[in-house]
Image: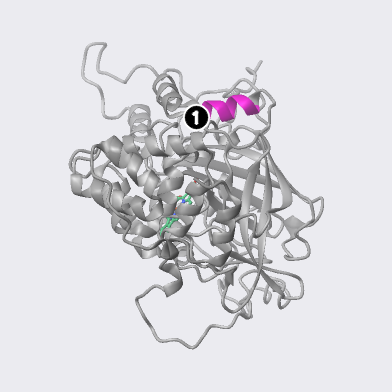
Amino acid sequence: GEPAPYSPTGRDTGNPPQTRAQDGPYLTTAQGTRLYDTDHSLKAGPRGPVLLQDHHLREKIMHFDHERIPERVVHARGAGAHGVFQAYGTAEGVTRAAFLRKGTETPVFVRFSTVLGSRGSADTVRDTRGFATKFYTEEGVFDLVGNNIPVFFIQDAIKFPDVIHAGKPHPDREIPQAQSAHDTFWDFVSLHTEAQHHTMWNMSDRGIPRSYRTMEGFGVHTFRLVDAKGATTLVKFHWKPKLGVHSQLWEEAQITGGVDPDYHRRDLADAIEAGAYPQWELGIQTFPDTPEQTFEGIDLLDPTKIVPEELAPVQPIGLLTLNRNPSNFFAETEQVAFHVGHLVPGIDVTDDPLLAGRLFSYLDTQITRLAGPNFNQIPINRPHAPVNDMLRDGFHQQAVHSGVAPYKPNSLDGGCPFFAGAGTGAYIETPVEVPAARKVREAPASFDDHFSQPRLFWLSMSPVEREHIITAYTFELGKCYDNAVKQRQLQALANIDTELCARVAEGLGLPAPEPTLPPADVMPSPALSQIGHEWPAD
Ligand code: HEM
């Protein structure tokens, strides 16, 4: 009789059959022709020349030669998992997004990542971590493409290539592979002082998480929620891990990175396989959608600023549970394509200039990374909602579209598909006033304060956390070759906190500079000074 069907893993992964690969019990060529041998090339005699007519040999080697695709230009190193998101219903008052209705369960895929290292780099390096979630909602895909740090290095996407060029390995030596310990990184962040806040988070224990399971996640930008009546609320998204936030000590990170560069991806996969499903609560901070788009003096369009939770508490709106490992890393974790522009009705973007650039960048890079415009048809990227678009043809087109008139409306293909009712579909223009303006290449004055929030962060740290921050700056800056770069970074630290600056300067054997800004300029916002008084002082 026929042999039993071949099972690639020997166990039922629970994944739907996605292609007709590995179908049937016989080993075949890509054309479905059965093979009797895959270990020997066709030759003119056992010791004779290999024959070009051996199609199986050519097909096998040709396909292998093209197995690699470009790694992501950033966030190349990552690990993913499937799960489910259960809505509490607590966001129903501010958004009409269907997946946030009480009790709704939505399948998700999450990819965690480091930012700077290449695909084969170690997991435990000091870096920001990506936390990207794809919600396969009944209204289409919603992607929340966040990080484990609530602020970003820059305020305008036009600087993204610059900050990444500064953070990636030096072009001549290709070192260091995945760390912030080098001249160009510190040169950039000391010249562009808006980066000091994000950098301080990196130098804190947040830069070396214990596990993906013990990281927070942040949407960073302010988003705009829209309710059923069209009323709008500004929000920031937060993921809070049920296991709490935990980090490694620097020495631990060196050891775990050395003995197991896969430390974080192993931890995630092992936990899920053991049934210890990691969970996060999704929460929102909400702010009135005023024309100024500020809250307590903080510009909500500035992605280098947080809104302290004391001023705007995080309100839980749902629970994420990761409960299934990918069955194929390449098909799922490598080919997944997130995009901040994948929005559903009830969730909209704001005019944060960093977000605007991201709306262009992800789609653009994925056309190269995934070879053409049809990567939304790759199984991991397919919406679970019905798709009826007017996109046609292109490389790797999988759909066989029917009809003769690929435009709407038309009188030949049976008329129009239905349109969502006014105000119920996605990408409606929420009627937000745009002030009369002239074209400029400049940032608003409200983006000028670069030091009050790093200072706030520093003042909120416990004594042991401060020691970790001091040793991290000292170690990382100690790896710079250029003393002028170190001195410029010390100047930025002096403007954040003189004790922090003095301790790092001492460790580097350099003089500690005086602050160039008076303390009043370092903490100008009344709301922030208030928080500073409540939190532990030096
Ligand atoms: C990839 C987050 C800013 C361009 C990613 C990923 C995350 C992320 C989590 C990995 C996605 C994955 O797992 O596949 C963020 C956050 C940002 C930010 C939180 C700031 C708040 C930017 C900016 C740009 C950018 C400003 C460009 C202007 C990219 C690109 C990728 C990427 C090109 C690779 C995408 C791919 O190849 O699929 N980002 N990013 N990011 N990001 Fe960002």
Q: Secondary structure at mark 1?
A: loop
Give the quarter of the image for residue 22.
top right
Whole-percent x, y for residue 478 in the image: 27, 36
| Residue displayed at 64% across by 69% down | 426
Judge whether residue 271 is colored magenta.
yes
* Colour mapping used in the image: one colour
Residue 415 falls left or right of residue 161: right
Which amino acid type is marked by label 1? Gln
Residue pushed farthest top? Answer: 46
Closer to the camera in the image, 169 or 301: 301
**Quadrant where the N terminus is found in the figure:** top right
Numbered-mark total: 1
Name above or below for residue 30 compared with residue 384: above
Q: Can residue 77 be seen?
A: no
Q: Nearer the viewer, residue 99 or 514?
A: 514
- Please tell me which residue is depicted at 53% across the width and 45% down the height of the picture: 148
Tell me which segment is drawn in magenta: 265-272
Name which quarter of the figure residue 229 lies in. bottom right
Q: Residue furthest right?
A: 103
Q: Quadrant of residue 213?
A: top right
User: Which residue position holds label 1?
Assistant: 248
Q: Position of residue 286 (x, y in %)?
A: 67, 63
Q: Please report the residue visible at 56 percent of the width from the left and 26 percent of the height from the top.
A: 267
